[in-house]
Amino acid sequence: MTDAQALVKTLDFQLDIQSDNESLLYDATLEARSAYNETIRLAKQGVDWDAIPDRVADDANLVKNTTQRVVAKALGAMENYYEYDDFGQPSHSKDGAYPLRANYEEGYNLSLTDDGDVAFRISAKPYKHVKGVLEGDDAHLDVLKTALESDEWKIGTAEALFHNDNPELHVNVTNTKQTVRDKQDSRTVVGVDVNEDNVALTALSEDGIEDSLVIDFPEIKFERHRYFTMRKRVQNAGKQSMHDTLEGREERFVRDRLHKVSRHIVEWSQRFEKPCIVFEDLKEMRDSIDYGTRMNRRLHHLPFRALQFYTSYKASFEGIPTGWIDPYKTSQRCPLCGHAERANRNKKRFKCRSCGHQDHSDRVASVNIAVKGIKKHQDWNVPTLNSLPQVRKVRRQASGAVDAPTVTHDAVRGYQTDGIVGVSD
Ligand SMILES: [Zn+2]
C-alpha cells in the first residue's frame, strides 16, 4: 500500500446549455443506459469480456470513446459483483438516464472564455455537440480554471448527467505535484460537526481527546435571514433585478465566511500529529429517514455541503486526508457510556439519560464523528473515554479575525459541567 495518494478532485457544475439542444444530451444519457444494460446482459450470457466493447459500440449511437467508458464502468460493476458478491448482481433492466462518461478532449472539451467563464462542449452523439458555459460553486470553478491553465493539473474523465432534471457535468481533476497522505496512516482523527451557526471539532488520538473547539459564526445565520427578508420585500415590490443583486451579495458574504471558517478548521487540525479530517457523509442518509428534524434542518441550510467541500479541498493542499462516516445517531450517542437516545439532546445541551454526562451537544456529535472515523479508517483502537476536556469556543467576527476564546481554560481533563459555560440555546 502506498502512503500517499494523488490529489484528485471531482468538481461538480451545472450546465448552462446555450446550443438549444438540451434534449440531445438527455437522449444521449438514455443511449448510455442502453449501452450499460447491453454490456451487463452480454456479460451475464457469458460472452467473452474482450469482445463486449466492440459489440456494444457497433449498436450504440454514441461517440465511440463514450461508449467505451460506459462499457468499462458496467464491466467494473460485474467484476465487483464477482469479487464481493454481497453487492448483488448488477441489473441490466433499469431504465432512465445513465451518466455519459467521456475522456477529456475526446468526448468533451473545456475552454476559458474572454469573460472568465468556462465554456464546455460535450459530444453527445457522433458529430452532435451540446455547448454552453459551466455554472456552479466558486470553489469548484476556481480549481477548474487553475487546472485549465496549469501544467500541474491534469483534467480527466467527466460525467454528464441529470440531477433533479437539471443537466450537470462532474469533472475529475488530478494534481500531479501534490499528494495527500493515505487516511489509514493517521494518528489523530478530527471529527467535524457542521451546523447552521457553528462547527464543532474534536481531535481524537489513541491517547484520548486531544482538544475540542467550537467555532461560532452566528452572523452567517443572521445575515442570511436579513437578506431573506430584504429579498422578499423587493420581490413583492416587483424589483427583480434588486432581488438578484441582493442574492449575489448574500452568496458572496456567506462564501467568504465559509472560506475563513474552513481555513480555521484546517489550521487547527494541523496542530495534531498526522491528522485526518472526518465529516458526516450526506450520501449515507438517503437510505434512512430516521435522522430527524435536526438533520433535515441542517440539510436545507447551505453551509453544510459548501463548508465540507471548502475544508476538504484546503486540507488536501496541506496533504491532509478527509474521511466520511455515516451520520446515524452521531448527535444522540453519549460519548462516555454509549447510550443513544433522542432525549439525550436538547438543542445545544446534551445530558445523557443513562449516566448523566452533560456537554455541549455539537461537541458530543464531533466526538462521535471522530470515533466513527477511527473505526472506519484506522487500525488503532478508539480510546476509552472517562472524561472529556472542556470545550473552548471562539467566535468569528465581522472582520474575519478570531476573537479570544470565550472559555480560556486549557483543555482540562476533569468533571464536565463547566465545559458548557457560555453556551446558549
Ligand atoms: Zn452516558
Image: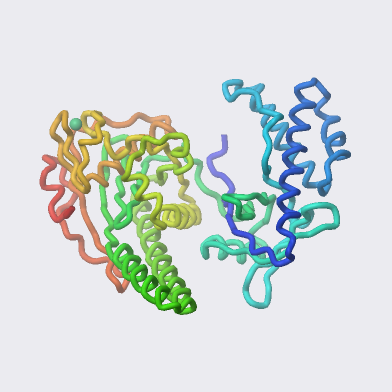
**Residue 40: percent from left, percent from top:** 74, 29
The answer to whether any part of residue 206 appears in the image is: yes
Closer to us: 416 or 304: 304
Write the residue at 17% across / 52% down: 410
Write the residue at 30% across / 56% down: 198
**Would you say 36 lies left or right of 179 here?**
right
**Residue 310: percent from left, percent from top:** 46, 57
The quadrant of the picture occupied by the N terminus is top right
Colour convention of the picture:
rainbow
**Would you say 147 lies left or right of 298 here?**
right
Can you tell which quarter of the image residue 293 is in? top left
Looking at the image, how many numbered discs can be counted on the residues?
0
**Would you say 195 lies left or right of 391 here?**
right
Q: Compared to 275, does 85 lie above or below? A: above
**Residue 103: percent from left, percent from top:** 74, 51
**Would you say 149 lies left or right of 224 here?**
right
Closer to us: 141 or 246: 246
The answer to whether any part of residue 389 appears in the image is: no
- Residue located farthest toward the right when viewing the structure as drawn: 58
Q: Quadrant for ligand 1?
A: top left
Closer to us: 381 or 226: 226
Can you tell which quarter of the image residue 332 is in? top left
Write the residue at 71% across / 29% down: 92
**Residue 186: percent from left, percent from top:** 42, 40
Q: Compared to 193, does 219 lie above or below? A: below
